[in-house]
Image (cartoon, coloured by chain):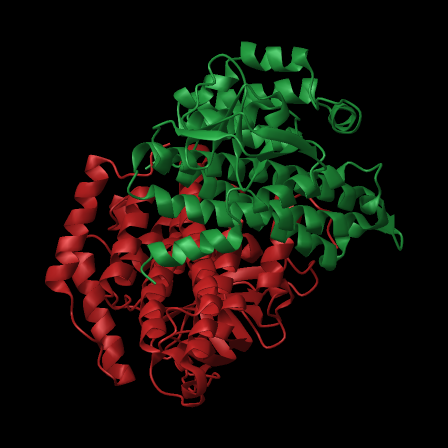
Amino acid sequence: MNFDLSDDQRTIKSTAREFLAARYPLAEVRRLALEDEQGWTDEQWKEIVDLGWPEIAELGTVEMIVVAEELGYALAPTPLQSTWAAGLLGADVSAGRGAVVVDELAADAGTADVLVDWDGNSVAGAEIEAVRALDPTRRLFRVTGGSREPLGGDLDKGRGQVTVMNAAESVGVATRAMEMAIEYAKDRKQFDRPIGTYQAVSHACAQMLLEVEGARSAVYWAAWALDFEPETAPLAVAVAKSYAGDAGRRVPRAALQVHGGIGFTWEHDLHFFLKRGEANAHAYGDGAAHRERVAALTGL
Amino acid sequence: MDLTLSPAEREFRDDIRGWLEANHPGPEPDDDKEAFEFRRAWQKALNDRGWAGLSWPTEYGGAGATLVEQAIFFEEVARAGTPPMANVLGLAMGGPTVIMHGTEEQKQRFLPPILSADEIWCQGFSEPGSGSDLASLKTRARRNGSEWVVTGQKVWTTYAHEAKWCMLVARTDPDAPKHRGLTYFLMDMEQDGVEVRPLVQITGEAEFNELFIEEARVPDENIVGGEGQGWPVAITTLMHERAGLAFALQVQVHILLRELQEQIREAGLADDPIIRQRFAQLYVESQVLRLNAYRGLTATMKRGAPGPEGSLGKWHWAEVNQGISELAMDVAGSRALVNEGPWPYRFLRSRANSIEGGTTEILKNIVAERVLGLPRA
């Protein structure tokens, strides 16, 4: 019994944290989201390829979700998660980037070399049209028509991995939003005292920690189960996605409330986290859909 | 990361599981007095296997078990549904406090009868005027030669009517700042100055007592940790209260959820989407409770102290446990008007979960100040 990252996994985590902090400060996230047409630069993608991150799932699902969590924490705009997802659903992404079509929507489809749908079919000759995304840090496209061919991957495991990867990203999003709220609650003074001294604020922050740590535990469990206890994995994935998906949007919402008016402004960075968290909560099955799976899998 | 048990841990689990199956004493007698003796006999049986003082050092009759073994034990006991041990407060709180802060004489004198359940312990901390603000307590102890004379009132003292010893925190220096003027005593309950009155709670039972103390005597040698050291010693006791229980509680939650699922089916609500969502959310949270408990365990073993998730367990458990019986009441529909069967009792009893052993509000303060580093109010 050892419910913690290994030393190697810790190293991956700290390397990712440092690299992403250096390359994607929030000013750069904002620039990419709002000013760069592609949403990320070719040099940034090349660096990520050079780090070997597109193949990280080959090391293990836990290794992948450790990086996914850090990508959410940094809110780094990159087609890496879409490329992972396409590969996990059976596409060959060794030579480039991928994207996954779910309900005619696909993040990063405009710059993908291969497209795959949620049922593990390759998608060729489809019409791809940019749509205005709720989350401006991730380019979103509508994908219609085209032909579908089964790819023959291990779809159950692949879907589980994609879902947990997304949930892990939400853990990172929630963690960063919580840290921003705590920082603000320490600094911001009203009625001559830091607002963090008021229990209405401090208890909201404590609630964030409950949800962040619970989400992290659930995501670690699901990632581990996918590789080492496949019989438990479907339940663990549904638990992780419903809880972490909820945390990924509830925590930024509460963080915005702690920030008050400044948190509602375009110039503050919090809204990027709020939008990513909300978008993730609806991707790959929302909380209600995964809770329904939990009910069914537990025999109800 | 490995969430499976090692071969040695599996063997330990199978040993306990097999023994509990073979030695389960059956249902408890209805009569309170008989039930208590039943629990005392059960503790003696466990102690013969070295499991009463599972976490205690071997030189004091314990098993020196690892944290994982303790977790396994609590899980198996909850799964088997065996009765609680009679001296639960002595085992979980009093004994560990004496082990950490007591003198060698105190360890020799007090520890063996805790394990054998020959001397039952109770806890005299809370007072009518001092709940969350424990350090404001007013029970006074004044020196008289080589003994102390204690006067005051305590409340919520579980097992006081069975207890031989009371972990009593009293004010010995009224002029010192409130955290510094306290001393931790082991008070003999069998004396004229101590009166125990049952305190009837909203369930109609009297699980707790009030303690009226009028010039009770405690000898000098029954001070634990030294005069004026009552606060740090009391904190040790409270930390122990919150630590070991996590595993037993999360398994109980899983057992209750299985029962609740049965209720849902019997009520014909298995296809009701609202009920399914509420049940699933409670199931998800119960898994999070379990996983956080295990992550906390690993953190404690590696770093010697629990990680941030450790402070969250009791508060989260209270929410989940209350949520389960709230859903059960809704599933019952108009039958919930009738106070029969286990669920109305559980519903009423669970209201105390967010108060006993530290209110949810106090636990949130602790998380905000000590884990998140927010400024004190």
Query: Camera-side residue: B377 or A128?
Result: A128
Query: Camera-side residue: B144 or B222?
Result: B222
Q: Position of residue A165 (x, y in %)?
A: 49, 34
Q: Is residue B106 above or below residue A23?
A: below
Residue depicted at x 51% and y 79%: B215
Q: Which chain is green?
A: A
Q: Colour of chain B?
A: red
Residue B97 visible in the current orientation: no
Residue furthest to the bottom: B338
Residue A77 lies in what quarter of the image? top right
Which quarter of the figure is the C terminus of chain B placed in? Answer: bottom right
Residue B280 visible in the current orientation: yes
Residue furthest to the left: B22
Left or right: A137 in relation to A116 = right
Residue B38 lies in what quarter of the image? bottom left
Query: Camera-side residue: B18 or B244?
Result: B18
Left or right: A219 in relation to A137 = left
Q: Position of residue B297 (x, y in %)?
A: 40, 42
Q: Position of residue B170 (x, y in %)?
A: 56, 67
Residue depicted at x 53% and y 73%: B150
Which quarter of the figure is the N terminus of chain B placed in? Answer: top left
Q: Position of residue B213 (x, y in %)?
A: 50, 79
